[in-house]
Amino acid sequence: MSEKFYITTPIYYVNAEPHIGHAYTTIVADVLNRFHKLAGSNTFFLTGTDEHGDKIVAAAENAGQTPKEYTDRISGMFQDLWPRLNISNNAFIRTTDAYHQETVQNILSLVKEKDDIYFSEYEGLYCFGCERFYTEKELVDGKCPDHQKEPDIIKEANYFFRMSRYQEWLIEHITENPSFIRPERYRNEVLSFLSEPLEDLCISRPKSRLKWGITLPFDEDFVTYVWFDALINYVSALGYPEGAAFQDFWPVAQHVIAKDILKPHGIYWPCMLKSAGIEPYQHLNVHGYWNINAGKMSKSVGNVVEPLELVDIYGLDPFRYFLMREMAFGLDSEFSEDALVQRLNADLANDLGNLVSRSLTMVHKYFEGALPSAGPSNEEDEALKNNAVLLIEIYQGHMNQLAFHKALMAVWEVISDVNKYIDQMAPWVLAKSEPERLKTVINHIFETLRIVAGLVWPFIPASAEKIQEQLGLTHKGDQCRLVDLRTWGLEKPAHPILKAPGLFPRIDLKRKEKDAPPAATKKKPRKAKTDEKPSAISFKDFQKLDLRIGVIIAAEEIPDSKKLLKLTVDMGEERERTVVAGIKEHYRKETLPGVQVLLVANLEPVKLMGVESQGMLLAAGDKGGLHLITPDSAAMPGARVK
Ligand code: ME8
């Protein structure tokens, strides 16, 4: 029987449209869900929307809609967003769903029967933004710390949940289960809160003040407090109490939230569960905030980052990769588009993208797409293999600790190992001198890529599946298992290895600066029209050009040059050439050997920074930076362009 895994996100309020914070939490849950599939578990992943309460009524009024119309619309936006972020949730719950409302009423009845609910008059400080009462002590300068507003004094009779009864039990449970709330800082925060007497929780609102909620099963004049309603989604979605999914998945429940809702999840929810006779969840995983310019994202400040806008510009997998690589789970992070572009160019386009492309090009060039078997291996081959196999264990350790950024760093170390291995082994030299050895080298590159593709799948699923397809693997995506990745040489390609079109287009860092000012203020004086296009040349002139395919076999820095790299290019029959190319700002030199290029071969040699250049590489420049022109499939070095 396979292990089970159950992961949830908060159910998001429908009073605002989805932003990058919601996207992050949901992507974290998705990564965990996919990772546990990779590990062979039977998983269940839940997300949804929180639709009752004052805030929603106010937002609906603002939008000129009824609460029902309004919640349908915004909940729909969340439901539309998740597939576009490749979120693999099994269910989407709305607190307005009938089955959820019924479960809330059942649990309220159970808790009431236990004498854990009582009726009482109460006067307190109420923040409508937070939809809860505050104690004087919790206020900062007399204001709600979240909404910076003085709370209203409200006096009303309400129902209360005897949370105080469970304080001692909760302290004991947290102390005995160190990973119940993690990372540790949030566990300590909850314990520190519990070191003061716990007050009972007001769990109703009179209908005279709020109608949009779930009616209490024991008093028609009241609706349920939105948190008592919302938290129950985690069990109602599984069909509590009888549902098979509840029996299977509740014992392994894990929640992902940000620190803003630590108290309801770390205190109210375990006490509610205990009172209702339900086992506590297994882990509460708490992350920090994404900040913008060192401040919290907020609609009023106007700095809300919309996920789909970023996905449209940079692509989904770069967006997912950036969020997971940049934030240390548990700590706050600063969001910056420039940092995203840098990660995309360096980690994805340069390191991973180029590795895949140069590796597959070699299988084509030397073996026509058929993966060769490995012969005897030497020390370097063994070192690469050991690092790649060991990576699986290291990765698993980090993932189990929610250290996603460390898991990715470990994968990228191995990516860098393969890039170095290729440079050291120089397959383009082996192709001429040691064809048997070449087979072993190519085979080791393939095996390492198989492991890398499997491990990056939870983070960048679409790209990983593309790589797996190109490698000809049978077990792609959610069919791939960690246990299979561990067995070196397990999978033979089911079809010839495919050519690799660029996986991650590079983005020009200067794009934003160029695009930013309005065109009117940026325009240079227009020149005469005839200067804008190169003038036409005759076919005869064109024929004078000698354009040829070359393969870069080495790339070196040129001292003191910011832009130039010195390349050694294999030209086939002809001798190797040295070419000085202005591509240093766009390509890392380690990733260039093996790349096929197009060369103007009959230019007069020129000296650049003291190095004679015997030709010129062709490249296209656009908003995305510089792109070397390369044939769509491996061509013979020296081949003429016709
Ligand atoms: O609190 N950085 O819903 P909500 C990171 N309905 N994550 C962020 C973020 C940021 N700047 N801003 C929001 C609610 N989030 C309740 C939950 S659960 C039973 C009820 C994410 O729409 C993060 O996950 O205000 C945070 O906990 C959640 O959105 C709050 O979502």
Image: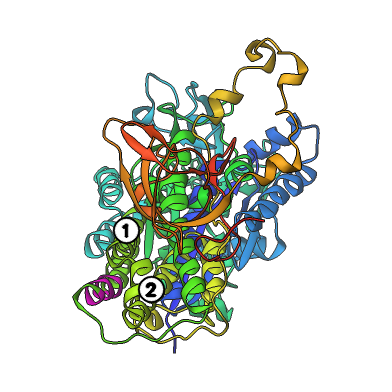
> How many residues crowd mark 1 within 10 Å: few (<14), some (14–19), many (20+)?
some
Q: Is residue 427 left or right of residue 87?
A: left
Count the labels in the image. 2
Seen at 47% across and 86% down, the residue is 492
Label 2 secondary element: helix
**Residue that mark 2 sits on:** 431
Q: Which amino acid type is shown beneath numbered disc 2?
A: Ala
Residue with the mark numbered 1: 416
Q: Main secondary structure of the magenta part?
A: helix
On the image, the x and y values in percent for residue 70 come to 76, 42
Query: Residue at horizontal 30%, vertical 71%?
Result: 388
Looking at the image, residue 234 lies above or below residue 220: below
Task: Check the picture and name the quadrant holding the C terminus.
Answer: bottom right
Q: Which residues are magenta?
A: 381-389
The response on whether ligand 1 sits within 8 Å of label 1 is no
Left or right position of 489 against 16? left
